[in-house]
Image (cartoon, rainbow, N blue to C red):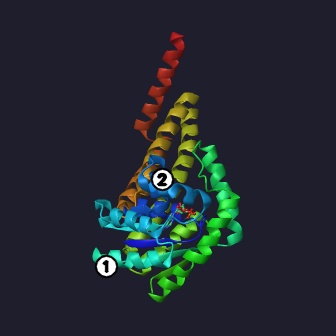
Amino acid sequence: MRLILLGPPGSGKGTQAQRLVHRYGIAQLSTGEMLRAAVAAQTPVGIRAKDVMASGGLVPDEIVIGIISDRLDQPDAAKGFILDGFPRTVPQAEALDELLKKKHMRLDAVIELRVNESALLQRVENRVAEMRARGEEVRIDDTPEVLTKRLASYRSLTEPLIHYYSERRKLLTVDGMMTIEEVTREINRILAAIGAVEARAAKKADSAKRTAREAKTQAKARAKTGAKKAAGKAGTRKAAKAASGKAAKKAGKGAKAAKKPAKASRKAGKTASKAKKTTRKAPAKSKARAVGKTRKAAKKVTKRRAKR
Ligand code: ADP
């Protein structure tokens, strides 16, 4: 799968790109990230790019085209990629067409994340606050002044790409004002519709996630109730805690397994139902084995107490 994510700063390209990478195992080629790494490593490219980036301008085309050309030749890009932040100008898009042609690669789609400009400043402010809270270094171009300049450059230089790709029948537009989850779902739906991913794979991954979440919640609830009953029988709170903890852990494991996309979905169903069964066993009202276990636990507690 070969995609381009198009959208102004703060439209959620980075977030969605990461989700696609995670789900489909393709490479994220972010020119912004690559340039920031070059600046940090003080490479010749980084030295040239530093001031332009800090002021919100665009790094010369020949630099970014060179970076992308090299990156496309790396083995991880062979499986597919998402371009995030490139192309940013019509000449860059033309250069990309040439590069792909030479490398015998075909673009599947260009996904435009359309957002309300008035929301962008707030989004970038939130991103800055979150990065600070995590103790991460904040981008020097994430200030209201530089953002205004980045937006202006998006409008004049990058927005023409919407027309460029729509003429070439590659453009697909997604409402970027929805929640992160909804945008992801919509992108997956689109990718399935154009045949870039197997429709069943996209659907399965979604339903597996949902099943896992539901199973986890249900199993936890059952474990709690069950453990309380067991505690009543054994006459100890500690036994209840142990039973509840074990059952909830098992349920959690089942749910975690289900998070793995597509092919894991059937397995996840099984694990989740296993988890359910396990938690049903936890109360162990009528099942002699489980009662025995609970009693053993209770005995241990009594012994420990007697020692004290
Ligand atoms: P944004 O969140 O604004 O989309 P990026 O992380 O993609 O930012 O890029 C940060 C900066 O890196 C840009 O403002 C620009 O200076 C430079 N840059 C990134 N990609 C390109 C590109 N394709 N062409 C020119 N400059 C670029």
Q: Are marks 1 and 2 in contact (CB under 8 Å)?
A: no
| Residue 294 location (% of width, % of height) | 47, 32
Q: Quadrant of residue 269?
A: bottom left
Under 8 Å from ligand 1: the CB of mark 1?
no
Q: Residue visible at 58% across and 29% down? A: 237
Please give the residue where the numbered disc 1 appears in the rendered image: 101
Q: CA distance from mark 1 to mark 2?
A: 31 Å
**Is residue 39 or residue 11 the one in the foreground?**
39
Q: Is residue 283 left or right of residue 77?
A: right
Position above or below: 229 against 61 = above
Residue receiving disc 2: 47
In the rendered image, the vertical position of residue 223 relative to residue 100, given as above or below: above
Q: Earlier in the sequence, mark 1 or mark 2?
A: 2
Dot 2 surroundings within 10 Å: few (below 14), some, or many (20 or more)?
Answer: some
Could you say where residue 249 lies in the image, as x and y percent from the top left?
A: 47, 42
Q: Residue at x 54, y 53 (%)?
A: 218
Mark 2: amino acid: Ile
Quadrant of the rendering where the N terminus is positioned: bottom left
